[in-house]
Image (cartoon, rainbow, N blue to C red):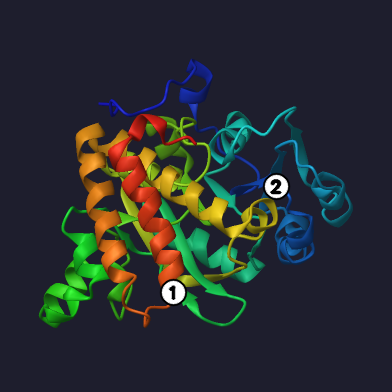
Amino acid sequence: MPSKLQPELDEGAREKPDHGGPAVTVTTVLYNSEASLPRYAEALAPSVGHGSVRVVAVDNASPDRSAAALRRLLPEAELIVNSANLGFAAGCNRAWPSVRSRYWLLLNPDVEAAAEELERLVEWMDRHPRVGLASPRLRGGDGNEEPVARPHDGLWRPPFEVLRLHKLLPERLRRHWLLPGRRTTPEIVDGWVPGAALIARSEAVAEVGPLDERLFIYGEDREWCWRMSRAGWQVGACGEAEFTHGHGGSARATWEEPERVRREVVGHLRATRLMRGGAWARAFALIAGLSLLAGSLDPRPRRGPATRRARARHYLRWGLDPGGNGR
């Protein structure tokens, strides 16, 4: 039975799949992405040339020359042009009606997906037929690995993590409850994986629906994984494939850090409201805000006190006045 959170779909979107040709359709939303595209295109070019990958990019009315750059760097890519910036979720969804491959890969323009890594990811998905969504391992340009197995929110989690109370838990419980803290990432994730390089099984998308367009940017990956899980599909983390992630190139080129942080918090909380309801989301926002405010007194965490205070303000403001969170 479809989830009550499932976005409305036309009948054509429910008729998938009709597989043939490339195994993977890659969709990338272009918005202030020009600087990232040379490495992105260089990594994808062999897969496109071999015919195993089709690229359908969506120009979200980008103010730079992203579309022209992609045409030059990867001429085989198909391009959908929007007259306005529809947001990440709606931008991706523009490509979904044309997907006829077994898999649909949402790939940020600051991610490099080498041919052999893409092949490993597809092989892994073939061996895990109940996985609806999955992420490969992500490694930043600095060589550090980015945890992709992420737990769903819990009201107890912010104080435990921000105030470092999880250090008091036995190691077994810590590994079970705090997925990013596991030494070995689980193949099947009881939570969500980020949308930077998110592969979807077309059969699962046809059943559950694509991204929720009520989420303009940030939070759409959390909600999609939640909806997939509620429909009986698994969320996976493929440790056999590794992509390189440039960490928010388009977002950082579009907004200064304070605005990017605000949008990240608001997107998170809007997704939480869709998943859990308004009362739960407000309670979580207040608990997270107070925990971050308390945690800002500790100068040791990777994110400094000023960043934590800024995030705390956004969480608290949303919790106290969720109707005005679009400011």
Residue 128 seen in this snapshot: no
Residue 215 position, x and y percent, is 47, 36
Residue 48 seen in this snapshot: yes
Residue 107 position, x and y percent, is 60, 53
Q: Quadrant of the N terminus?
A: top left
Q: Is residue 38 left or right of residue 235?
A: right
Question: Which is nearer the N-term, disc 2 or disc 1?
Answer: 2
Mark 2 nearby-residue class (10 Å; few <14, some 14–19, many ≥20): many
Does residue 192 sit above or below 167 in this rendering?
above
Residue flagged by tag 2: what amino acid is it? Answer: Val
Query: Secondary structure under badge 2?
Result: strand
Residue 290 position, x and y percent, is 25, 57
Task: Find disc 2 in the rendering and name its residue.
Answer: 55
Residue flagged by tag 1: what amino acid is it? Answer: Gly
Q: Nearer the viewer, mark 2 or mark 1?
A: 1
As drawn, the label of residue 267 is: none
- Residue located 73% across and 53% down the image: 33
Task: Find disc 1 in the rendering and name its residue.
Answer: 304
- Residue located 71% across and 66% down the image: 43
- Residue located 28% across and 76% down the image: 182
Q: 188 or 265: which is nearer to us?
A: 265
Mark 1 nearby-residue class (10 Å; few <14, some 14–19, many ≥20): some
Does residue 78 sit above or below 168 in this rendering?
above
Q: Are marks 2 and 1 in contact (CB under 8 Å)?
A: no
Q: Is residue 30 left or right of residue 126?
A: right
